Image (cartoon, grey):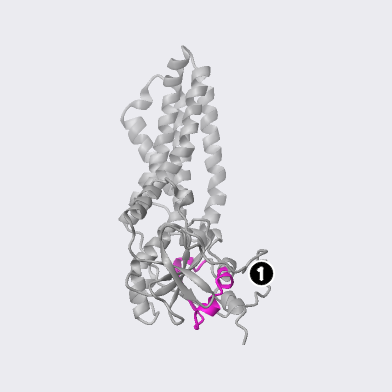
Amino acid sequence: MSTQITILPMAKAVPEGAGKFSLPSPNQSFVLDTIATAVGEVARVGSTLTAKERRGHYLVRWNIGRDNFTVEPGLYALGEPDRTSHVLVTANYKMTFDLLRREMAGRSLWILVLDTRGINVWCAAGEGTFGTEELLDRIQASRLQEVVEHRKLIVPQLGATGVAAFEVKKHSGFSVQYGPVMLQDLPTYLDNGCRATAEMRLKNFPFRERLVLIPVDITLALKQGIPVMLLFFLVAGFAGNGTFLQAAIFHGLPPSLALLTGISAGAIVVPLLLPWIPGRAFSVKGGLCGLVLFVLLFVVSGGINMDYTFLEKSSWLLITLAVASWFGMAFTGASTFTSLNGVKKEMLLAMPVQFLALLSGFGLWVAGIL
């Protein structure tokens, strides 16, 4: 009997070249050696992370080297797997891959890595890169049906939004089992015959998990914010009274501080205080945090009572609210508090308001210094 899989027509077109046989290179730094299989030598990895890999994890938390922190997609062996070993599906974001193999210490299994463009499972499922078509492509490209005798795949539950189990079964013959939400529950799940308890299906978002996401949010926010602040100083220097330097500092500093206040509210306060901030929409949460910080920093401290026009003072508030709302809303990509449809609906409503507020703030600021 032939073991070749036939990719049948799907709702979405299968990309040209999908399913072409390929295996990850064994020359990647984390690969120990190879293991012989029916389809050739498969790269074998271990569970122990090196100091260099742990350092890489720290750096990507600060968005350093994030775009290149990937592994080649395809099939990997952990330990000494055989034809009966489990097949775990994951993303090619190296931190995700590393944490999975570390958690599976002492076990022998196969890891099927999807090409998610270096994005973690949760975010990639929302964007569509951790999806049905890509999974079918990797099954075929790895000739997985020749490597294992069973037809079962264990997919992270956080990737369920991107993978249609019935489509995978229909087009490949492999059934999909959704593993637990939390990676640390995976060993128990496997030992329990791939049965999840009710607790394994629940996802909390504790303070520590929110805290570790802040550095990358801050670096991304500053990457967008610093050019805008430079623009404030430049426009203020040319449009304000006095010397260029005097005008740039006097008129450019307050809106720059307003922008930093908005970034702090949306990228720091929202993640830290997420469960306790009123409102369901993240854009609203961000706006509320921005308002509170603005009052504390510009009103209570007396900074807003300096010799500035009413238009300038009004512009600072609009800039703070727009920026805080934007970066608060951006945190939805890291949270399991929201659904993909809910995020799209919120963005559709919030983005025009945010843009209008920012544009109005900039316009009032320019009018105030002329």
Residue located 50% across and 62% down the image? 25
Does residue 269 appear to the left or right of 111 in the view shown?
left
Count neighbours of disc 1 (C-alpha within 10 A) and say few if under 14, some if 14 to 19, many if 20 or more. Answer: few
Q: In this figure, what is the number of numbered marks? A: 1
Above or below: residue 194 compared with residue 365: below
Q: Position of residue 18 (x, y in %)?
A: 63, 66
Q: Position of residue 293 (x, y in %)?
A: 36, 38
Classify mark 1: helix, strand or loop. Answer: loop
Above or below: residue 77 compared with residue 277: below
Above or below: residue 113 compared with residue 356: below
Q: Callout 1, which amino acid? A: Ala
Residue located 38% across and 82% down the image? 193
Residue located 41% across and 47% down the image? 216
- The residues colored magenta run 138-161
Q: Is residue 270 something one can see in this rendering?
A: no
Q: Position of residue 290 (x, y in %)?
A: 40, 40
Q: Is residue 229 something one can see in this rendering?
A: yes
Is residue 139 located in the magenta-colored stretch of the structure?
yes
Residue located 45% across and 49% down the image? 66
User: Which image quadrant: the N terminus?
Assistant: bottom right
Given residues 219 and 26, the one toward you in this image is 26
Given residues 284 and 228, the one toward you in this image is 228
Quadrant of residue 34 in the image?
A: bottom left
Given residues 269 and 245, the one toward you in this image is 245
Quadrant of residue 178 in the image?
A: bottom left
Is residue 154 located in the magenta-colored stretch of the structure?
yes
Does residue 249 appear to the left or right of 145 in the view shown?
left
> Which residue position is annotated with label 1?
11
**Extreme-bottom residue of the structure:** 1
Above or below: residue 45 compared with residue 228: below
